[in-house]
Image (tube, rainbow, N blue to C red):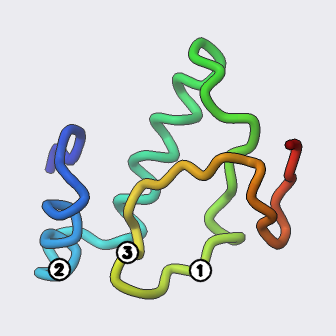
Amino acid sequence: MDILGKSIIQLQDLISSKQISSAEVYSYFMARAKKHNNDLNAFLTLVDEQTIKHEGDMAGSPLAVKDNFCTEGVRTTA
């Protein structure tokens, strides 16, 4: 299933209906970030799956957080 270009609502519908898992969504977007980040320099820190808790309604949703927010276990540079 091609999930690139789907909205957060569409992704959540796919996860809720069990057509795809939150772990699959996470893995897909993490692989893209790792593949393209050297060229784009979009992220200072990519957080691995072991650090993330897959809980709640937004589990699996791709999300970038500005690193001026203190997050336990993640580097804050601002």
Q: CA distance from mark 3 to mark 2?
A: 14 Å
In the rendered image, which quarter contains the C terminus? top right
Labels 1, 3: front one: 3
10 Å crowding of disc 3: few (<14), some (14-19), many (20+): some
Q: Judge whether 28 appears above or below 39 on screen.
A: below
- In the picture, measured across the screen, residue 77 lies left or right of residue 34, that is right
Disc 1/disc 3 C-alpha distance (Å): 11 Å
Q: Is residue 67 above or below residue 54?
A: above
Q: What is the crowding at mark 1: few (fewer than 14 residues within 10 Å), some, or many (at least 20)?
A: few
Q: Is there CB contact under 8 Å for labels 2 and 1?
A: no
Say left or right for 78 vs 57: right
Give the residue furthest to the bottom: 56
Dot 3 amino acid type: Met
Q: Amino acid at mark 1?
A: Lys
Residue 16, given in percent of the width and then of the height, sits at 18, 81
Tell me what residue is drawn at x 85 percent, y 68 percent: 73
Q: Which of the two residues, 1 or 60, is positioned nearer the viewer here?
A: 60
Residue 18, numbered circle: 2
Q: Which residue is mark 3?
A: 58
| Residue to which mark 1 is pinned | 53
Secondary structure under tag 1 reads loop
